[in-house]
Image: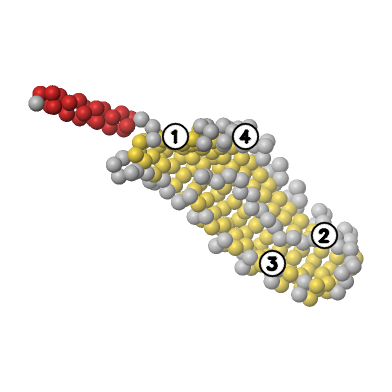
């Protein structure tokens, strides 16, 4: 009987030791199957994929994410039971390439992007993953190159482009994600270069071409986007902007 009691005592002691050791070790899962404490996850080849702490299965505090080649990819600080995070992403040389916030794993508020010289390349605005507000692209001197308006995930409002010295090079308007109404291209001296109208994202009506001194050079008429003078040499091709430059996502 004493032997049996001794063996039971050893078994209980061992179980208690294992439980306490698990609580202080990495990658602990509680009785409810929820991640707790410090965790490390690795790629199939054994290299570190991420490291950080969980509380009740939700990330909390600082997390670090790595590329498969071993370099740091992103650093995030989690709060509000893992719903909110402030993140910074890096390239393979350790240079900051973007920073911003997530809410429920969706981009939120203003995201800023940098080039290899650590100069601001662009800024984007979101509300819980939905494009909203003005998006900007910048020249290296800090001057805005392009300004695109967003509302509820669609382009809405005045679209502008600028020369490097800050003078306008283009003004147009979006309505429900389509170009509508008058569009102006300008020479750097401020005079009109190309003037026309859009209707539902295609050229419509009379388009005028000007010389740099302001004199009218030529014109053509569009109907449903089709020109009456297809062989006319154009000054420039008007394209819709594509300013989405998302580089890294928090995985």
Give the Cα distance between marks 1 and 3: 49 Å
Which of the numbered marks, if any, corresponds to residue 40? 1
Assess disc 3: are there few (<14), some (14-19) or many (≥20) residues with their C-alpha within 10 Å of its C-alpha.
many
Which of the numbered marks, if any, corresponds to residue 236? 2
Which of the numbered marks, if any, corresponds to residue 179? 3
The kind of secondary structure element at disc 1 is: strand
- 171, above or below 245, in the image: below
The structure residue drawn at horizontal position 55% and vertical position 62%, both measured from the top left corner, is 152
Q: Earlier in the sequence, mark 1 or mark 2?
A: 1
Assess disc 1: are there few (<14), some (14-19) or many (≥20) residues with their C-alpha within 10 Å of its C-alpha.
some
Give the Cα distance between marks 2 and 3: 17 Å
* 68 with respect to 141 (left or right): left
The kind of secondary structure element at disc 2 is: loop
Please tell me whether mark 3 or mark 4 is closer to you in this view. Answer: 4
Q: Which residue is mark 4?
A: 92
Q: How far across and how far down the image is residue 57, in percent?
A: 37, 44
């Amino acid at each position: 009987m004493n032997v049996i009691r001794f063996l039971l005592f050893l078994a209980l002691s061992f179980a208690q030791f294992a439980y306490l050791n698990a609580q202080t070790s990495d990658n602990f899962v509680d009785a409810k199957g929820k991640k707790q404490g410090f965790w490390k996850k690795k790629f199939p080849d054994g290299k570190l994929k991420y490291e950080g702490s969980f509380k009740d299965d939700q990330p909390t505090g600082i997390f670090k994410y790595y590329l498969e080649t071993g370099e740091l990819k992103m650093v995030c600080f989690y709060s509000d039971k893992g719903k909110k995070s402030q993140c910074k992403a890096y390239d393979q040389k350790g240079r900051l390439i973007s920073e911003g916030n997530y809410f429920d794993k969706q981009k939120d508020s203003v995201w800023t992007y940098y080039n290899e010289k650590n100069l601001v390349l662009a800024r984007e605005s979101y509300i819980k993953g939905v494009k909203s507000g003005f998006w900007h692209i910048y020249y290296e001197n800090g001057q805005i190159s392009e300004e695109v308006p967003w509302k509820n995930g669609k382009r809405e409002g005045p679209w502008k482009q600028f020369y490097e010295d800050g003078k306008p090079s283009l003004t147009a308007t979006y309505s429900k994600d389509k170009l509508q109404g008058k569009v102006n291209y300008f020479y750097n001296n401020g005079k009109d270069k190309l003037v026309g109208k859009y209707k539902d994202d295609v050229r419509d009506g009379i388009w005028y071409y000007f010389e740099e001194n302001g004199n009218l050079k030529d014109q053509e008429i569009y109907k449903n986007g089709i020109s009456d003078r297809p062989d006319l040499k154009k000054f420039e091709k008007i394209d819709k902007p594509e300013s989405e430059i998302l580089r890294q996502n928090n995985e």
